């Protein structure tokens, strides 16, 4: 797999939503005297973002930008987006299911394993560093149970 160093990823996080009867674009307003002026109506202001440094297992790191209200799942998607230029097939393909099945992101000594958790729950702030940690997901752990060969089992009634 080829080695990649990413300095910074900048994504647009601002989104505006329309409310019924409201416009997110400018429109002229007409005053009682007939004059007009531009007005703006926003239903939602852009959310604050956090720049987080992600340290890989090899010691290198990269920076991602996520919303302050992001979940662990959003954080993982942000990490995946850093590597979106990687091929979908072949030897350099990244299997994210396998990555997240064997590793997780950690903040200090705390593993971020519950996708629905808000990252603010862990006290993560702007310019903090997260790192990859070995972790076997319960979704990936499959315990193979076999019957020992030296035992024999009898079905039916017991003989006295």
Image (cartoon, rainbow, N blue to C red):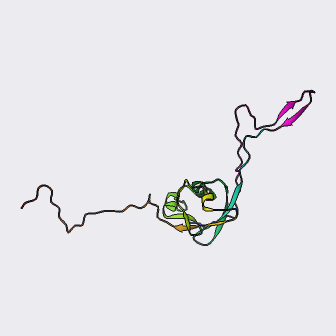
Q: Is residue 137 magenta?
A: no
Q: Residue 51: percent from the left, percent from the top? A: 69, 61
When the figure is inspected, residue 83 is found, relative to residue 40, above or below; the finding is below
Q: Nearer the viewer, residue 30 or 132?
A: 30
Q: Tell me the magenta residue range.
A: 11-40
Residue 147 x/y as whole percent: 25, 63
Q: Magenta part mainly helix, strand or loop?
A: loop
Left or right: 30 as drawn, with respect to 142 = right
Task: For the C terminus, give its image quadrant.
Answer: bottom left
Q: Is residue 28 magenta?
A: yes
Asked where in the image residue 29 lies, by quadrant, the reply is top right
- Quick check: 46 above or below 101? above
Residue ID at (44%, 60%): 138
**Residue 34, located in which quarter of the rendered image?**
top right
Question: Can residue 83 be seen here?
Answer: no
Residue at image x 22%, y 67%? 149
Where does residue 139 sit, x and y in percent of width and height? 44, 57
Please state the horizontal and vertical placement of residue 86, each as a whole percent of the image. 59, 58
Return the residue nearer the eye: 137 or 6. 137
Is 14 placed left or right of 101 in the picture? right
């Amino acid at each position: 797999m080829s080695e990649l160093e990413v300095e910074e990823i900048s994504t647009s996080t601002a989104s505006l939503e329309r409310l019924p009867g409201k416009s997110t674009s400018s429109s002229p307003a007409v005053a009682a005297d007939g004059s007009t002026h531009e007005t703006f109506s926003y239903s939602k202001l852009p959310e604050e973002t956090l720049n987080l440094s992600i340290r890989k297992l090899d010691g290198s790191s990269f920076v991602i930008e996520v919303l302050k209200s992001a979940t662990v799942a959003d954080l993982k998607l942000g990490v995946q987006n850093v590597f979106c230029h990687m091929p979908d097939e072949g030897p350099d393909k990244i299997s994210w299911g396998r990555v997240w099945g064997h590793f997780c992101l950690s903040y200090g000594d705390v593993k971020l394993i519950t996708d629905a958790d808000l990252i603010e729950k862990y006290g993560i702030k702007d310019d903090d560093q997260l790192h990859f940690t070995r972790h076997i997901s319960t979704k990936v752990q499959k315990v193979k149970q076999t019957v020992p060969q030296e035992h024999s089992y009898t079905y039916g009634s017991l003989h006295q």
